[in-house]
Image: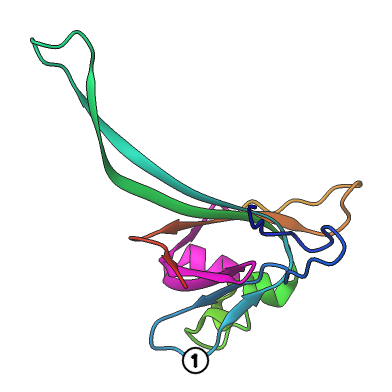
Amino acid sequence: MATYIVAPGGPAGEISSPPVLTLTVDGQVGNLVIPSLQDVTISNSNDVFTWTQLNNDSKLQVATTATNSISTNIVVDSVLFFGTGVGEAADDKGVFGLSKDKTEVGFTINIGDKILSGSGFVTGLSPTVSADSPVWVTPVTLTINGAITVA
């Protein structure tokens, strides 16, 4: 029987912690903890090299390097988005400062009882507010530099 990762609020009797995204800046003290995730998408897309040969009537392909990213939508608060403005740590810069300054960040995110980690760059910010959603929300994409580690 398969073991599924159940989202919070899933079937009765199943226990799962909601995903929390944590960002860090290497050499700095002060994590930026983002618990207000609305959704999470983890992408691992392999590139493919394609070629043809005279002795084959079909194209041949081989998988090459992967492009990894994590996308989410978050509910914005001023400290989370703009930081404290005091130093160079992730919580000082906030999501906006990390993106604007093109700061490479370390990240961890829990998925069930597994923790994904790696490093990358914060991109894709586009805060919005509307009558149907009276709080600011923004998409956030972590474009990952290298591989995602699973622990």
Residue 124 locus on image (x, y percent): 55, 51
Residue 51 locus on image (x, y percent): 17, 22
Residue 93 locus on image (x, y percent): 55, 77
Q: Which of 119/25 is in front?
A: 119
- The part of the image, by quadrant, that contains residue 25 is bottom left
Q: Residue at x 23, y 17 (%)?
A: 59
Q: Which of 25/20 is in front?
A: 20
The amino acid sitting under disc 1 is: Val
* 112 displayed left or right of 25: right
Can you say whether 77 is above or below 133 in the image?
below
In this picture the colour scheme is: rainbow
Q: Which of 141/68 is in front?
A: 68
Q: Which of 86/66 is in front?
A: 66
Q: Which residues are magenta?
A: 95-124
Residue where numbered disc 1 is placed: 29
| Residue sitting farthest toward the front | 1
The local crowd at label 1, few if under 14, some if 14 to 19, many if 20 or more residues have their Cα within 10 Å, is few
Q: Residue at x 32, y 38 (%)?
A: 47
- The part of the image, by quadrant, that contains residue 84 is bottom right
| Residue sitting farthest toward the right | 131
Q: Residue at x 33, y 60 (%)?
A: 146
